[in-house]
Amino acid sequence: MPATDVTLSRADLVSRLGGIPGSAEVDVRPDGLWMSAPAVDVPAMGRAMTDLGFRLCTMTGLAAGDGETTVIYHWVRADDAVHVKATTRGGALPSLAATVRPASWIEREIHDFFGATFTGHPNLAPLLRPAALKEGFFRDATDPAPPAGK
Amino acid sequence: MPYTVPIGPYHPALDEPYKVTVTCGGERVQDIRVDVGFSFRGIELLAQRRNWVEAVTLIERVCGICSNVHAVTFCTAAEAIAGIEVPPRARYIRTIMYELERMHSHLLWAGAAAECVGFQTLYMETFALRERVMDLLEAIAGNRVHYGMNRIGGVNRDIGDPERVAAEVEAIGAAVERSLVPPFLHDRSVINRTAGVGRLTQDQAIEWGVVGPVARASGLAIDLRRDYPHAAYGDLDFRIVTREDGDVRARVVVRALEFLESVRLIREAVRRMPAGPLRAFEGAPVIPPGEATARSEAPRGEVFYYVASDGGQSPARVKIRTPSFVNIPALEAMCFGQQLSDMTLIQASVDPCMSCTDR
């Protein structure tokens, strides 16, 4: 069971987030702390957040340029939340599935929807994607190329 | 020698499609694999092609049981982006709808559970009482399933006679306490069928990240109605229900007692509900560029929405995480070492919703 430091102040939490390799400035918003850190060390973030008693609520995929995907890791603890935005490099991010179990299905879903790869995932098989559609079909549907000549 | 048994996607115990492939040694379950996606509708993607008003209607159809919680949570995220403050009366109406939805959802689950343990009369009794909750929802909203109560900025309609709602809820609560709680909590055949079955320890509950009654039945005191007060919960005296055993029986007990807590919350909400407007503005919403998240406590646990706007007519991105999406994978831990014959009961004890999971 992870240690849950429920007494951690918001300032301490910001400081702890700053200690994660690849971290960036933290933005304080009504729905939690937001950190846009494209190159964050994902496994280190997973360890840090778990140690702080946060639970991985889910991850959101967003189509980014050049075929990359922005992945928002939504961590929650009681009334607090931390949202960390990372971006795939070469279409991939390290998987959290081996150490953070709830990451397994959502990584498969993001792979289905956006084609992002999660390196080290034990079984990145389709979860929700209908067999007739290709990986990344959300990306194709939301970011269509303009018709030629228009 | 191990053998495998496929259960589903036309599931013997549940009306929604999913597949569980069970590997057994003798009668003992050694491993399970869950396959989902049979009801995939692409609602997140479709929401990006609807305007903000249409998106509420679409998103309410994520689920036919907890439809209200999806509409409210989506609206809450959009309201956060736009800085819209929902009027107090609308917050109370949302809360009453949350709890009515929880009542009918828990009764639906209890009926399915009674059928799983072979207690047909209890199943019929449960569904007869659930019907009264459905009648109440229909009287308020005009619909039994998709209520259309919510809009960005508040609610579409008032609860015309809240005292009548409170009185009927009270009567249903008394009937549940008299007819359903004793057999579910004390009947020997129910206890024999559920105690010690499908156990999920507290450590496993943390490891798998489960939420809602499944988590609370494993001793995790997490409930957004207390931890992250939304709608009008911050004004109400909410009492969280937990059990330590982590088995099917604990999940039964938690839901039964939560039902009675819902009755109490509705009574208190009706008593405290202020007069006032139902919505912050008239007409179509304008959602400026931005992003926000929202969380609500659905009957099955935490619902999470991420919503982004580019300032246009439609959401730029809607991400929906339902409680079943994190509760169903934990079946792997609950089923290990259990009897093959208990598989349907253990699965039902999670109250899995494939409509929510697949979206």
Image (spheres, coloured by chain):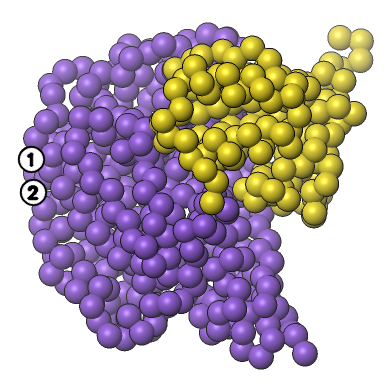
Indicate the colour of chain B.
purple
Mark 1 is surrounded, within 10 Å at the Cα level, by few (under 14), some (14 to 19) or many (20 or more) other residues, namely: few
Between A140 and B239, the residue placed more toward the observer is: B239
Q: Is residue A134 above or below residue A87?
A: below
Q: Is residue B319 above or below residue A99?
A: above
Q: Give the numbered dot on residue B167.
A: 2
B241 vs A114, left or right, is left
B176 vs B144, left or right, is left
Rendering quarter of residue B18: bottom right
Residue at the location (21% across, 51% down)?
B261
Question: Tag 2, which chain?
Answer: B
Residue at image mark 1? B163
Q: Give the numbered dot on residue A36.
A: none
Measured as percent of width and height from the top left, residue A27 is found at 56, 13
Residue at the location (58% across, 39% down)?
A51
Q: CA distance from mark 1 to mark 2?
A: 6 Å
The quarter in which the C terminus of chain B is drawn is top right
Indicate the colour of chain A.
yellow
Residue at the location (64% across, 19% down)?
A18
Q: Is residue A113 above or below residue B274?
A: below
The quarter in which the N terminus of chain B is drawn is bottom right
